[in-house]
Amino acid sequence: MNDRAAPILPSRDLSETLAFYSALGFENRGAPPDEWDYLILGRGGAELHFTLDADVDPFRTAGSCYLFVDDAPELYERWLAVVRPDPSTGSRVEPLAETGYGMREFAVVDPSGNLIRVGTEIR
């Protein structure tokens, strides 16, 4: 069975969201944002969907999801080099850490306030 799920997260500006995630290596797998007022982004087998919500407050967690990856430390270094903390939106990369539940993970907060946790199982 090939079940899968894709979170639908709010975006205050779909073009801004597309630019942010494109810099992280995601690709647009749908129509241009202004055509659908909806965005489908993918990276490997992962997909994130975004719906327009111009009233979202970027300083409150708007939505969240967990992205399982093969090498969180390597991805952390790449994304840390791309995402600069932005005091006007709160976007940032949170530090890489080992958890008590067996994951090596970090988090990214996007310009709409979405929290994307990224992790790899510690083996």
Image: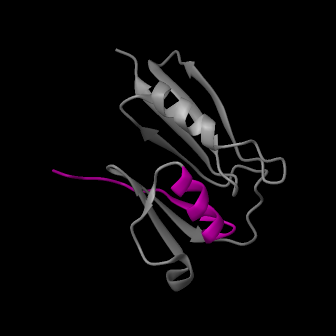
Q: Position of residue 15 (x, y in %)?
A: 61, 70
Residue pictured at 67% horizontal, 71% vertical: 53
Q: Is residue 123 above or below residue 16?
A: above
Residue placed most toward the observer, 64 or 87: 87
What residue range appears in magenta? 1-23
- How was this image coloured? one colour
**Residue at position x 67%, y 69% in the image:** 13
* Residue lying at the far left of the rendered structure: 1
94 inside magenta stretch = no
- Side (left or right) of 43 relative to 89: left
Closer to the camera in the image, 97 or 25: 25
Residue shown at the point (46%, 54%) measured from the top left = 26
Give residue 55's position: percent from left, percent from top.
76, 70
Residue 75 or 120: which is nearer the viewer?
A: 75
Compared to 19, does 76 lie above or below? above
Quadrant of the frame with the C terminus = top left
Locate residue 16, reporting x and y percent.
65, 65
